[in-house]
Image (cartoon, grey):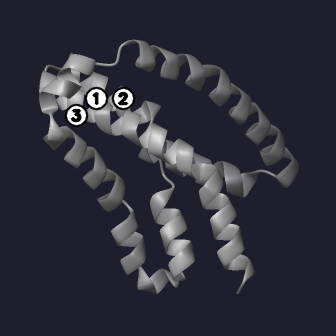
Amino acid sequence: MLTAFVAGIAFNLASSGDERARDAAIDESVNRVLALPLLLYLGAVLPWQDWAALGWQGVALAVAVLLLRRLPLLLLARPLRFGLPDAVYLGWFGPMGVSAVFYLTLIAERGAATPGLLAAGTLVVVTSIVVHGSTAAPGVVLYRRVVGRR
């Protein structure tokens, strides 16, 4: 993962704006082509019974992860000089998705994951996708309205 990050920085420094724009369009196309089938597969194999076995603790975990994963850190990141609307916007919109499921299945293949961990992980990912997806459009409108007043 660090290698991909460093390669992205090197590419950004060595390429022109036209190359980045062309590659961004290709990247977006590949992302749409691959992400949709993966999300459909995830939807087909959702562990409903395992989620039910988690009970209220599973719901509490999903809510806690959504609220505590990024938002408090960005609200406290005063050296970055984010205003409150910027910190809330950046802290809220960061859904988990295919990469989190990939890591869950990777540790499951290595025998390090219990069924409870897989159920909790997939519950958090699906909750993130649904909640962040359903709040994206209203969130952008609200953010633009609040930032436009400044």
Q: Residue at x 47, y 59 (%)?
A: 92
Q: Residue at x 46, y 14 (%)?
A: 41
Which residue in the structure is indicated by mark 3? 120
Q: Nearer the viewer, residue 137 or 94?
A: 137
Q: Are marks 1 and 2 in contact (CB under 8 Å)?
A: yes
Q: Which mark is residue 2?
A: none
Q: Residue at x 34, y 19 (%)?
A: 46
| Circle nearer the N terminus (2, 3) | 2
Q: Which mark is residue 101?
A: 2
Left or right position of 65 against 26 = left
Kindly report the distance in space between the C-alpha atoms of the residues bearing marks 3 and 1: 10 Å
**Label 2 secondary element:** helix
Kindly report the distance in space between the C-alpha atoms of the residues bearing marks 2 and 3: 11 Å
Q: Which quarter of the figure is the C terminus placed in? A: bottom right
**Label 1 secondary element:** helix
Q: Which quarter of the figure is the N terminus placed in? A: top left
